[in-house]
């Protein structure tokens, strides 16, 4: 199969505001139907919209962070269509003068060697979200207008993403970036991040490139479904082309919906003359002029973004791209936590290990967040110092961290109470080594007869010594003394 | 500029207006005379003139992001031609 997949994404993001884009009712998710409306969002006659400053600024912040070009002059347009999701029969949107053009996202490299590419954006514009229809009331549909009028950012990528995994990568990086910016919570399950994908194939045959008809995929409710649907659709389009040979010139764009249970795309009924939205300038809203001073203020409000932070973790702390990404992709709180522990200990790799293995695992198990994690960065830094100085071995450190999480007490208190001093008494450890060898004669035989690798046997004996000393022995010393004793016994 | 019956039929469909064949001819004639009248504007030389985005020379009218009291559901649904306990009911239109 010699073809390339070509993907363009159309992403909608709800902005995190208290009130709607053009009116005062709230934006909360999951409230009972039609309890979050006002005369403007119901489209009642005689009402007028007023722009929400915060929404516009969050939109600006996003576009600046994504390296887009901000229009010095932008206006609103009416997109006209009859569908009960907006009772005004038009959506306030932006057509020919959007506030932002261009921009890009860096797709992080993946373990499989993919990624590491750039996803270019075509434009970003601001609009109002629509209400929600629930079908199946005996030929009727219920309309809930809680969502109508929530500020919505539309982000359109260039149609040049070349794999399903890159499309997912682009979307995940966008979510991470928007969360860093505190612009949106980007919950796909709750619909605050939504994505449609336009996809077709470039098939290479006899030195020519044939493009298949474009399909827009809807109902993509998770990152996983985005990737799966694109893979499914590529395969389907190839088979379809083999069957009927239709190209982009023979068939118009069609819409298909992703079915998450059946894992396939199905044709959706087209809205008649859907493309004819008869845009015209919105007379109820005045244009917006963005000057250099305003843009400067927006720029100042943007902190370090995920892409820059990964690079800094690699350069400043010598982390591998993989480790840097694990710490950054968990969100700003985790990356801040790591930054603090790394700076306080100077042990960059150790700090990364402790956070990845112990902190993140605990958080995941408890379904909590770093903000709720009872051990603050200074506390973990102190513990890492003690392990590094040889006061504790790693296992003891782990145990103590466990107690710190349970009790909220500092390492020092737990060490004093629990008798957690590491044993570095040479004679005591030598005796324990001797005892372990004596108790396990089979182990020595295995080395002598070459039945097991010496390293495996040593590992086993080391474990026995640690067990005898209640896990308190200095592991370096155990290794050294065990090595010496075995060298004598098995020359 | 001249509109055909088909153009007017399409606009009527987009506006969800049901128009009889007789009405269609009448409206096509009437719309054409309006469009022809407005077409006089085409005679003006607009070379180098920025398209007008808004009739009022006012910019940047914002409100603070403050949440106010929403309508009660009963008030919100008061004018609904058809409703159930929680929402407006409309004839099912599938996406």
Image: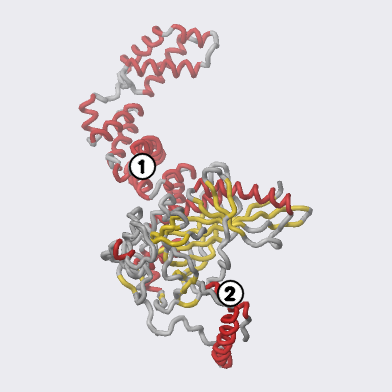
Above or below, A487 relative to A118: above
Q: Position of residue A370 (x, y in %)?
A: 33, 44
Q: Position of residue A54 (x, y in %)?
A: 34, 66
Out of B56 and A485, give the one closest to the viewer: B56
Residue at 64% over, 55% down: A200
Q: Position of residue A407 (x, y in %)?
A: 23, 34
The label number, if any, that marks residue A201 in the structure image: none
Above or below, A214 relative to A472: below
Residue labelled with disc 2: B10
Cβ atoms at labels 1 and 2 below 8 Å apart: no
Residue at 44% over, 67% down: A126
Label 2 marks a residue whose chain is B
- Assess disc 1: are there few (<14), some (14-19) or many (≥20) residues with their C-alpha within 10 Å of its C-alpha: some
Residue A177 in sight from this viewpoint:
no
- Color style of the picture: secondary structure
User: Distance from label 1 to label 2 (Cα)?
Assistant: 71 Å
- Assess disc 2: are there few (<14), some (14-19) or many (≥20) residues with their C-alpha within 10 Å of its C-alpha: few
Q: Position of residue A186 (x, y in %)?
A: 41, 54
Out of A458 and A21, give the one closest to the viewer: A21
Out of A63 and A190, give the one closest to the viewer: A190
Residue labelled with disc 1: A346
Residue at 40% over, 77% down: A284
Label 1 marks a residue whose chain is A
Q: How many numbered callouts?
A: 2
Determine which quarter of the picture holds residue A439. top left
């Amino acid at each position: 199969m010699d073809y390339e997949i070509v993907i363009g994404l159309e992403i909608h993001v709800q902005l995190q505001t208290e009130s709607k884009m053009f009116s005062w009712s709230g934006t909360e998710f999951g409230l009972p139907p039609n309890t979050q409306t006002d005369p403007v969002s119901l489209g009642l006659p005689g009402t007028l919209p007023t722009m929400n400053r915060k929404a516009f600024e969050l939109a600006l912040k996003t576009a600046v962070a994504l390296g887009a070009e901000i229009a010095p002059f932008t206006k609103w347009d009416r997109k006209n269509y009859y569908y009960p999701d907006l009772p005004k029969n038009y959506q306030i949107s932006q057509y020919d003068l959007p506030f932002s053009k261009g921009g890009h996202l860096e797709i992080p490299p993946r373990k499989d060697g993919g990624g590491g590419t750039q996803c270019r954006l075509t434009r970003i514009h601001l609009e109002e979200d629509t209400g929600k229809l629930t079908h199946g009331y005996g030929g009727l549909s219920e309309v809930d207008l809680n969502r109508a009028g929530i500020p919505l950012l539309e982000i359109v990528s260039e149609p040049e993403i070349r794999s399903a995994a890159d499309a997912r990568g682009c979307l995940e990086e966008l979510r991470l970036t928007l969360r860093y910016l505190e612009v949106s919570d980007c919950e796909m399950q709750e619909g605050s991040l939504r994505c449609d994908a336009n996809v077709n194939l470039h098939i290479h045959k006899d030195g020519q490139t044939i493009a298949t008809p474009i399909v827009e995929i809807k109902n993509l409710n998770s990152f996983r479904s985005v990737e799966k649907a694109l893979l499914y659709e590529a395969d389907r389009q190839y088979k379809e082309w083999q069957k009927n040979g239709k190209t982009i010139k023979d068939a118009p764009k069609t819409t298909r919906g992703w079915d998450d249970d059946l894992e396939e795309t199905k044709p959706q009924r087209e809205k008649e003359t859907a493309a004819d939205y008869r845009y015209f300038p919105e007379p109820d809203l005045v244009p917006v002029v963005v000057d250099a001073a305003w843009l400067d203020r927006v720029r100042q409000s943007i902190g370090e973004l995920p892409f820059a932070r990964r690079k800094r973790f690699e350069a400043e702390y010598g982390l591998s791209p993989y480790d840097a990404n694990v710490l950054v992709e968990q969100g700003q709180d985790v990356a801040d936590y790591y930054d603090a522990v790394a700076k306080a200990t100077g042990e960059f790799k150790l700090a990364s290990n402790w956070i990845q293995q112990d902190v993140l695992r605990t958080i995941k198990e408890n379904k909590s967040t770093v903000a709720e994690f009872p051990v603050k960065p200074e506390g973990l830094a102190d513990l890492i110092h003690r392990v590094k100085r040889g006061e504790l071995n790693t296992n003891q450190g782990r145990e103590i961290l466990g107690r710190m999480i349970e009790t909220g007490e500092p390492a020092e208190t737990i060490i004093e109470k629990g008798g957690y001093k590491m044993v570095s008494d040479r004679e005591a450890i030598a005796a324990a080594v001797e005892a372990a060898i004596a108790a396990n004669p089979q182990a020595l035989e295995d080395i002598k007869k070459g039945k097991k690798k010496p390293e495996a046997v040593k590992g086993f004996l080391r474990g026995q010594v640690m067990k005898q000393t209640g896990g308190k022995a200095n592991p370096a010393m155990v290794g050294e003394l065990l090595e010496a004793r075995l060298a004598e016994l098995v020359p | 500029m001249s509109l055909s019956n088909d153009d007017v039929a399409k606009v009527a469909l987009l506006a969800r207006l049901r128009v009889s064949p007789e009405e269609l001819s009448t409206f096509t004639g009437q719309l054409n005379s309006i469009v022809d009248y407005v077409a006089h504007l085409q005679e003006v030389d607009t070379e180098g003139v920025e398209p007008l985005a808004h009739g009022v020379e006012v910019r940047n009218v914002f409100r603070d992001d403050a949440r106010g009291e929403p309508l009660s559901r009963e008030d919100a649904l008061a004018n609904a031609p058809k409703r159930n306990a929680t929402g407006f009911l409309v004839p099912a239109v599938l996406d």
